Image (tube, rainbow, N blue to C red):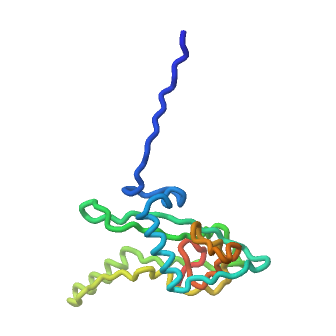
């Protein structure tokens, strides 16, 4: 009898319409590259870090890009969003962070504030501060590897000395 051959299928994903799992894949799609470029430009405008030679005996934190599609109510794509996330699990307590704090509001508190606003006939407005989390300054010295694809050609061995917070760091803003 002949041995049975195994059927193999190859599925090709179009990451123009779904979130890529890695930088390697995202870097092949112009929309995701534009999102990373926009985020990197924001970091530069806000002076999020300075490129410096790696200080001796410093704990270097890694980073990675994370991708998210923002959709309209009809399901169409509203925005391609790239976020640079620090690998905070590389941080060491007492070295590059001293305390953690996670500002969270409880649903009952929101309901209470809304109830007071309604009973007092106050007008309510909602707004979103773009990159609000990233405006806070760091107290500790935190150094991070340069982001994938954004390594400075003149100083490829330099590191990013963070002045402001990034998603993923152990310390959060108060």
Q: Position of residue 146 (x, y in %)?
A: 62, 72
For the residue pair 23 and 87, the one nearer the viewer reads as 23
Q: Position of residue 19 (x, y in %)?
A: 43, 58
> Quick one: which residue is furthest to the right in this view?
56
> Quick one: which residue is furthest to the front in this view?
154
Q: Quadrant of residue 171?
A: bottom right
Q: Quadrant of residue 50?
A: bottom right
Q: Residue at x 53, y 73 (%)?
A: 167
Q: Residue at x 60, y 68 (%)?
A: 63
Q: Position of residue 79 (x, y in %)?
A: 36, 68
Q: Quadrant of the N terminus?
A: top right
In this rendering, would 50 be left or right of 108? right
Q: Position of residue 131 (x, y in %)?
A: 45, 80
Q: Residue at x 71, y 73 (%)?
A: 157
In this rendering, would 113 be left or right of 53? left
Give the number of callouts. 0
For the residue pair 77 and 127, the one nearer the viewer reads as 77
Q: Residue at x 44, y 69 (%)?
A: 35
> Quick one: which residue is furthest to the top in this view?
1
For the residue pair 130 and 121, the one nearer the viewer reads as 130
For the residue pair 29 and 94, the one nearer the viewer reads as 29
């Amino acid at each position: 009898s002949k041995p049975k051959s195994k059927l193999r299928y190859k599925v090709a994903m179009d990451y123009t319409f779904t979130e890529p799992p890695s930088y390697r894949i995202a870097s092949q799609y112009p929309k995701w590259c534009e999102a990373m470029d926009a985020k990197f430009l924001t970091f530069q405008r806000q002076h999020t870090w300075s490129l410096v030679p790696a200080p001796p005996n410093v704990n270097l934190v890694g980073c990675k890009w994370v991708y998210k599609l923002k959709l309209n109510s009809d399901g169409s794509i509203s925005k391609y969003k790239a976020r640079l996330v620090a690998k905070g699990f590389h941080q060491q307590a007492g070295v590059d962070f001293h305390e953690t704090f996670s500002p969270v509001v409880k649903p009952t508190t929101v309901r209470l504030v809304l109830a007071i606003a309604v009973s007092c006939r106050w007008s309510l407005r909602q707004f979103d501060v773009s990159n609000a989390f990233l405006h806070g300054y760091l107290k500790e010295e935190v150094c991070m590897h340069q982001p994938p694809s954004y390594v400075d050609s003149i100083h490829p061995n330099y590191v990013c000395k963070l002045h402001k917070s990034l998603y993923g760091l152990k310390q959060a803003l108060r």
